[in-house]
Image (cartoon, grey):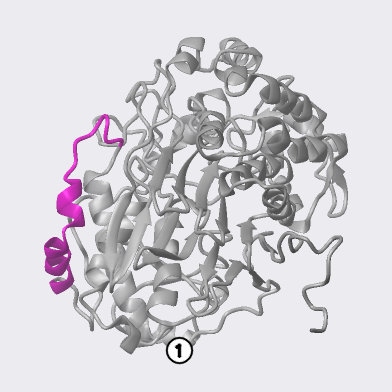
Amino acid sequence: MNAESPQSPKQPVLASRAVASTNHPVASTVALSMIANGGSAADAAIAAAFALTIVEPMMVGPLGGGYIVHRSAEGVFTAIDNYAAGPARAAPDMYPLEPEKGPLAVRDRLNEVGRLAAGVPGNLKGWLALHAAKGRLPLAEVLAPAIAYAENGFTASAYTVECITASAEDLAGDPDAARIYLPGGVPPKPGDRIVNAEAAATFRLIQREGADALYHGAIGEALVRDHAAKGGLITQADLDAYEVRTPPPIVGTYRGYEIVGTPPSSGGGLLNQLGLNILENFDVAALGFGTARYWHLLTEVLKIMYADRARYLGDPEHVSFPQAFLLDKDYAAKRAKDINLDRASSFTAGEFADWRESKNTTHLTVMLADGETVTMTQTLNNLFGSCVMVPGTGLMQNNNMTLFDPRPNLPNSPAPGKRMLTATAATVVQKDGKPVMALGTPGGLRIFPTVLQGMINVLDHGMTLQESVDAPRIWCAGGALEVEPGVPQSVCHELTAMGHTIARSERIAGGMNGVQVDATTGLLHGAACWRADGSPAGLSGGPATPGNLFGASPYAMR
């Protein structure tokens, strides 16, 4: 590579039977325990999601939202949209603006902290829908590890403590959240144990009642009471009305590979395919990874992607937009001709809006040797969501309402039942009908460009997946070009000369992870990057050789 990655503390894992790569080592090992006991990739992914609720509580939980892409061993894809939705009492003008603080600034951060920031949750229903459709193990077994970690505690990492510290002021405003995450009124120290016994009891209720525990049961009753008492919007009618969607995934091609990604209301799959279609008109590999000309081309493509995002995209059940047009390769070829390879340009498909998406999300990927794959991005949105907990449940509420544009009469303005436009981009790459890799990342608005870079690092620049997720990143949505420390100053000088305004960023997006298949051996390579606590875990070996318990060793001399 022509740019310097920081020395990564992470190492890839190699396995023959299965790999799970999540944003916490505990969740990765939990996932493998399901597979070792005869479970499917779906069992493993959902067990990991519940475990992440406990060990990565700032990022994910049953009261959040997300997107799932599942590939069966036979190559059939299913996408699940379990994102949060606007409550029935949501309105386009529900958030008073403070334009003197910025075009999207909302008074008292009402769309960020507190009950008005919480959308109708979808995670629990989506997780259990995947388990019901694709799981093999009993739900009680899938939740058992998360219950154990909730009840007995987990060891806080430096990263966990950093996230709690960053949110301490907001968490302190909610006594239920503060009791768990600010013991004695201060954040824990690395190495301290964090216990959430209330979440253990909640998970036992879910073991018995499934999703009804939230949507038609005691958890939902507690959530509705909390909103009624504290000025929130969510009612029992909202929970009754919530449904998981299963739209077809976005499917496209790139240099002979098939790309399968998340469908709208996530814009990530569509926009990444648009970006790949544009890049297909250039010899990306010849530019060389990390050169100024490479970063320049990528930046110009990202500007086009964000311009089209701002102009067109929203919840497809509430907003009509030209999906087929945006995915058309002829359209991409025309946009490619607009790119000046020597000079930065502006692109005006639509007015760019600085959507308030958070970088605080989680992603996990599970792949089995038979090709069954789950790649899913799930979130509370900001760190600890709205920073309020449903009393008595141990569960944090989301602040997904932040993802709406608080200005009325726009494609992504708040509305009853409407899903917020997101940037998630859980992706599977195939060749000749067989998996090549599956990947995704947290990172809010920066998710899909980061996953795009993860793909082309492998497909164009020949990196391993571990090299790809660790590699330096850039991001641009029409303003300054953000670059990570691994982009040398000399390259930044060249980019400045081409017309870019450079802004240094310690990290862009979050902890990308995924699984790659070795084309020669068929072995699975798991990878997780240096930007978060993620770790891959692999399972090799297999069952005992039939008959060798009382018979001759298969290695006996003959």
Q: Residues within 10 Å of mark 1 (few under 14, many from 20)?
A: few
- Residue 292 in view: yes
Q: Residue at x 33, y 72 (%)?
A: 298
- From the top left corner, tell me how far across and down residue 237 is, in percent: 46, 11
- From the top left corner, tell me how far across and down residue 487 is, in percent: 49, 80
Closer-to-camera residue (35/292): 35
- From the top left corner, tell me how far across and down residue 296 is, in percent: 32, 77
Label 1: which secondary element = helix
- Indicate the quadrant containing the C terminus: top left, top right, bottom left or bottom right: bottom right
- Residue 315 falls in image quadrant: top left
Q: Which span of residues is magenta-colored?
A: 315-337
Which amino acid type corresponds to the residue marked 1 in the rendered image? Ser
Q: Residue at x 51, y 54 (%)?
A: 373
| Residue wearing tag 1 | 490
- Residue 390 in view: no
Q: Is residue 25 magenta?
A: no
Lateral position of residue 327 relative to residue 54, left or right: left
- Residue 62 falls in image quadrant: top right
Q: Is residue 533 above or below residue 527?
A: above
Q: Residue at x 71, y 35 (%)?
A: 143
